[in-house]
Image (tube, grey):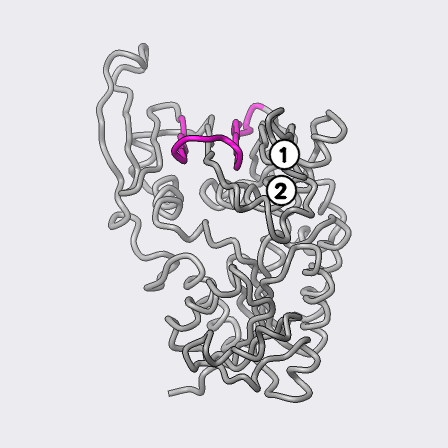
Amino acid sequence: MADKKKIVIIGFGGQGRHWFREIQNHPDFELTGIIDTDTEMLEHLKEMTAGMVDNDQGYVSIEDCVQFGEKPDVAVIATPINTHHSIVRETMALGINTICEKNLASTIQQGRQMLQCALDHPELVTAVGLQNRFGYGFWTAQQFLRSKECEEKFGKLGVIKWYDSGYRGEKRWGWRRYLMEIYAEDQCTHWYDSLRCITGLDIVQVKADCFMPQYSDWHGSSTIMANLALAAPENYKHRHKWVWCQLFGDWQLGGPPSSSFQFFGEKGQFTIASLGLELKIYKDPTNRTIKIEEDAYLPVDAGPIRNTPYVHQGVILEQVSRGIDAGGAIQPDTCFKEAFKSFAVSMGAIESSHTGQAIWVPKYWEDMPCYKE
């Protein structure tokens, strides 16, 4: 059996502790350190990690970890978004494979520098914590749209309605209170990435409004309404071949949380549900309202997520492990090159909200040679 890969977590807050649990469940990794600026917490690591990490395996920086402990194979960066840019570059400069939580960065310029860093170090594996694409429902939708069954029952995809809301008052506190566009900078990037993964298309245009309801006392916007256009590279300028999405996301509405992910095609429609896809097939092409046949497409039809026994962050860890074994020759699905396009949509949505203009998203990456291969 090969030696386990040494992994450290940078930032041991809520998200860092979630990665801690995921690392425990993956046999390829051994947690060898925790990095955080909270020195009081570091004194109690053995108790906090149930003995997985000793108190002397806590460090205040990745440089200290390498100098005074063992150099890790992988670092998970689970710190606030505004710190990602510098910590990622410092970590990769030390020759360490990197998993960075989303959002990738706070500005498009920072994100471009992080992408360039990954391109400059092809021997290193990178990944972004965009794990929602590896959930059962979204994976099932992706596989259905690529199946023979899709052509028969659904046809060409045309419109998507994406809705997610629920009161998340706790998100107002902690490091997020410093974000100007809380939902748009944080949660919404998951949705852009999931839409891109499910459809296999890029988001090329975004027109968005980010705002706080008038009753809100948050420091930053909790809500986004956005119209998105998705297209394959060969159809970027062919508007009639775009797929359109109306997206609403919110952390301020009261009442029970609610989500609805609906896809509309020429022959039918489907909704992503907890047990797979709920299909409605139009039996009369001349009248799509009267004769509708209900059907389903299940996770068992889709198969294991990326040929792994894992879900969510577990898939990312598995792909990182395989990438390290390949010396960087293969990269995770959410490597910086791929994740940058989802990150770019989040920056475009914020720019659109500030300017009132529709934003052409490819402007953020079309001058980078890595996308012209």
For the residues labelled 2 and 1, the Cα–Cα distance comes to 13 Å
Q: Where the C terminus falls, by quadrant?
A: bottom right
Residue 243 shown in magenta: yes
Residue 291 shown in magenta: no
- Amino acid type indicated by mark 2: Ile
Point out which mark residue 204 bears.
none
Residue name at image x 30 percent, y 42 percent: 274
Q: Indicate the quadrant where residue 255 lies.
A: top left
Write down the region rendered in magenta: 240-264
Point out which mark residue 217 bears.
1
Expressed as whole percent of the image width and height from the top left, the position of residue 127 reads 56, 62
Earlier along the polypeptide chain: callout 2 or callout 1?
A: 2
Judge from the rendering whether residue 20 lies leftward or rightward of residue 202; answer left or right: left
Residue name at image x 66 percent, y 55 percent: 81
Point out which mark residue 182 bears.
2
* In the foreground, 144 or 272: 272
